[in-house]
Amino acid sequence: MAKVRLAGISKIYPDGTSAVSDLHLDISEGEFLVLVGPSGCGKTTALRMVAGLEEISSGTLTIGERVVNRVPARDRDVAMVFQSYALYPHLSVRDNIAFGLQLRKVAKSEIRRRVEGAAGTLGLTDHLDRRPRNLSGGQRQRVAMGRAIVRSPQAFLMDEPLSNLDAKLRVQMRAEISRIQRDLGVTTIYVTHDQVEAMTLGDRVAVMKKGVLQQVAPPQELYERPTNIFVAGFIGSPSMNLLQGRLESDGAGARLALGEQALTVPASLLAERPALRDYLGRDVAVGIRPEDMEDADLVEASEGTVLTSTTDLVEALGSELLLHFRLNVSPVVTEDTKELARDAGADQIDTESRYSDLIARCSPRSGATSGQPLRVRVDTGRLYFFDPLSGAGIWGESAPALQHKEGSHV
Amino acid sequence: MTTPHGEYEGAPRRTAVSRVVGFLGSSIVQVLLVCIGLFWLMPTLGLFVTSLRSPQDNAASGWWTTLQEPAQLTLENYASLLDNPSFVASFFNTILITVPSTLIIVAIASLAAYAFAWLEFPGRDWLFLLVVGLLVVPLQVALIPIAQIYGGAGIYGSILGVVLFHVGFGLPFAIFLLRNFFAAIPRDLLEAARMDGGKEHTIFRRVILPLGGPAIASLTIFQFLWVWNDLLVALVFADAQAQPMTVALQSEMRQFGANLDVISAGAFLSMVVPLVVFFAFQRYFVQGVMAGSVK
Ligand SMILES: Nc1ncnc2c1ncn2[C@@H]1O[C@H](COP(=O)(O)OP(=O)(O)OP(=O)(O)O)[C@@H](O)[C@H]1O
Ligand SMILES: [Mg+2]
């Protein structure tokens, strides 16, 4: 295993498409780094450049201590798990797994030992003599993993390895990949556009948008302190509600006007994020996570924490309810939110709209029914604020108080 | 068909009449197909039977009379054919021409096809277009210029000359066929092999060749048949020592009549070998070789 370092890596395809721009990533030994982002943001391209399957247009790629920009894929000593698995159809499972070792002229007995070890780890021992076409999807996926792990490479590269599996199997394999990676301690770069995979697997997660790296951070930090609207909206499911609001000074704290309603921003929050003071009396983009809202009838809701509306739709998920409702507040329209809408498969955001649709994640004990008035309590200490034009998160210098408080989450 | 019997009978529009009509329809088609097949085989059968009758019988009556008089059948024609040294020599010439041409074409074409499909080099697509363009050049226009070149090189009339000509004119189609087949092999598979540490020649030998099996088998059969049955090229380029069976048989044709006994037995022999080759390779036409590979 080795550290992998991408310094200013860019890729411009021959047709002029700029797929990755100036990507800086430092992946330490044994780290599990997940690359996420919407479709077409350049994740696969970045991974293929590390693999040596795609030429690097500019920048420096280092694996271990070696600059490998010009080293062919076969000599980089990294293993890749393909989304399609790419198993050799004419070879048995055993030979599929052993192929890389055979090409490297490893001794027969050693190959046998390692293949059987890998097959044991992956539960493939009974299938070693079968052909890929006689395996289930999950077993094929394991063979693809086996092919990577027998080689004990410097790094694993995985491009959406689970996306062809059904939901249940995906959860199981996700846990397995996590376990194997931890056991072997091999540096791993994992591409996905499933943010649950990203959050559960990654030691750190790198979010990309249109070829540009937005933020790299441990999953919880990404969730707690997104650097901009794009990361905030991309991480979390259901995604963060984003509204156009206005901050007004109100004693030690502040008042956040959302259309004709208002929330009180606690003074402690202003203290934690000093940069917010600059936005008093100005428009801001506000983010409220669905899980930071609750049916006000179930909890004690103090003055200035409640939004009222009418329930449009109730989605019962058993353990929780998703309440959809509408507020008379303009949605946030920036490059980021447009990109998020595109990723979610929605139509273009209506820039003239004076309404926003929100989702709250409530306790199943809530009696909300569609068409009935709704009161939602907002955890105002956990509001997110962004610059309405640039979309950058408003955090200010990280105050000691904040570090202390958030330490418990990490 | 898969529904339970009761439901099947109860289906409103499947009346007894319509089922009878359906059955008749499908069996009529089958009978028709068998008839056409037999009709198609008639000349071959005629040739075979003729080759088993004496020249006198063949001169006296048609081959179908054998049905009434099976006693006519004899292996004499074959025996005398195999006793004829010039025919036996032509048989070996055919093999000496066909086998090397086929092997050389398949070898060169599969390497070239891999390069055209999967290696990056400047001018690759233009070069491939050129190869495809060569497909339309009729062989006849090259006969005289090549004969002149061969004359200069001193290989006119030799087996080598015939082989080279076949290789030259067989390659464009062979490359075209194999390139398209190789290009359909999923890219991921080759990339996986590259990541596994494969150099190009290893990938070619251990991934492309096994997966290209069906296409290579078809190409081998086609190429073998074409060269085996060729008359024109051999007629122009092969001298008496190098002449293959097709030329030898053709020389038995006379302006008035023909040595039917020699021709029928020889022609039948010349058919048997390609059939053997065909059946030897047909097991490689397995469907779905790629199953289980990607996805
Ligand atoms: N060979 C190529 N030639 C030109 N453009 C390409 C090529 N491959 C990818 N692209 C473009 O580069 C951009 C990034 O593609 P990439 O495949 O890296 O995206 P991705 O993040 O992996 O997306 P997905 O989640 O859909 O797999 C896309 O706009 C794509 O159209
Ligand atoms: Mg991709």
Image (cartoon, rainbow, N blue to C red):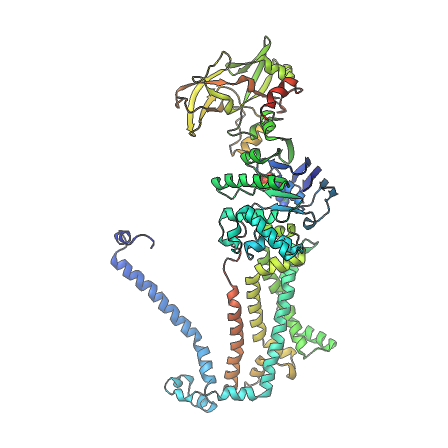
Q: Is residue A159 visible?
A: yes
Q: Is residue B135 left or right of residue A75?
A: left
Give B87 or B146, whichever is nearer the viewer: B87
Q: Position of residue B36 (x, y in %)?
A: 40, 71
Residue B243 to residue A381: above or below = below
Quadrant field for ligand 1: top right
Give B123 or B179, whichever is nearer the viewer: B179
Q: Is residue A85 visible?
A: no
Q: Identify the image quadrant of the C terminus of chain A.
A: top right
Q: Position of residue B268 (x, y in %)?
A: 50, 80
Q: Residue at coordinates 46% horizontally, 81% vertically from top-left? A: B48
Q: Position of residue B293 (x, y in %)?
A: 54, 52
Number of marks present in the image shown: 0
Q: Quadrant of residue B91?
A: bottom right
Give A37 or A120, whichever is nearer the viewer: A120
Q: Quadrant of residue A236?
A: top right
Residue A286 to residue A27: above or below = above
Q: Is residue A111 left or right of residue A367?
A: right
Q: Residue at coordinates 54% horizontally, 87% vertically from top-left? A: B81
Q: Residue pushed farthest bottom?
A: B56
Residue B14 to residue B79: above or below = above
Q: Quadrant of residue B73?
A: bottom left
Q: Identify the image quadrant of the N terminus of chain A.
A: top right
Q: Position of residue B286 (x, y in %)?
A: 50, 62
Q: Is residue B219 left or right of residue A316?
A: right
